Amino acid sequence: MNRILIVEDEVPIAQLIKMSLGRAGYRCEAVHDGLTAADKIEQNPYDLVLLDIMLPGLGGYELLEYLRPMGTPVIFITAKGTLGDRVRGLQLGADDYIVKPFEVAELIARVESVLRRTGRGGSKLRAWNVTLDLLSHRVLQDGAEVSLTPREFDLLEQLMRNRGAALYRDVLFERVWGGEMDDSTRTLDLHIQRLRKKLGWQSRIKTVYKVGYLLVPEEEP
């Protein structure tokens, strides 16, 4: 399980990020000032640091300089959204740059991308009683293999990566089928129905009215 440090002085935002990434299967800690973050980084190894720029005590740019020799990937999450700010952050060595406000699904996707790119991403996703193995392209439920088509596998991967977050229909279609969804097509709905049936997840893959679909996190019934 990847370990992530969240450095964000706005407590509600830090809690939202921690909750969302926790639901997605990450082990997260949150601190609210730069000096505490520096102490944490010195004492513990992290796979990724999510870093605000404007912090009390010690700023995000200074923390990035502290992290660079360790090779720990960093994603800036900040309200400083001008082109100059983004260019500076990336030139200083940040692996990605997210501007507030952001969508939870985008945050999770960017975290996954940076972890994969830096060789720290896990090869297995887990939710409820299902394990999805990205390397062997197998799905196990309670230890027994479940036969899925390639599209069903890709769709399940998206739902598991973003569990707890509602995914728009057109976003799912673009990520799984690689194209723009025709409003008249029921392809996505049919694949969702088959996934529900094969996994017995009728109540766990929820339809979100006028949005799309959501995989219920494990703390919910």
Image (spheres, rainbow, N blue to C red):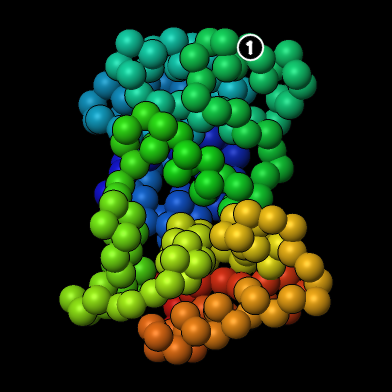
Q: Quadrant of residue 212?
A: bottom right
Residue type indicated by callout 1: Arg
Regarding residue 15, the answer to whether it shows in the image is: no
Q: Quadrant of residue 191?
A: bottom right
Regarding residue 155, the answer to whether it shows in the image is: yes
Q: In the image shown, does 71 or 42 lie closer to the viewer?
A: 71
Q: In the image shown, does 75 or 207 lie closer to the viewer?
A: 207
At x 26% / y 57%, what residue is drawn?
136
x, y percent for residue 166: 62, 66
Q: Residue furthest right?
A: 183
Name the residue tied to disc 1: 88
At x 55% / y 28%, what residue is drawn?
96
Up/down of 137 relative to 119, above or below: below
x, y percent for residue 9: 56, 34
18 left or right of 131 in image:
right
Does dot 1 land on a helix, a strand or a loop?
Answer: helix
Up/down of 179 relative to 46, above or below: below
At x 41% / y 32%, what residue is drawn?
117
**Crowding at label 1, few (<14), some or many (≥20) Cα neighbours within 10 Å?**
few
Q: In the image shown, does 125 or 177 lie closer to the viewer?
A: 177
Quadrant the C terminus occupies: bottom left
x, y percent for residue 69: 33, 11
x, y percent for residue 100: 69, 38
221 left or right of 210 in image:
left
Up/down of 26 relative to 58, above or below: below
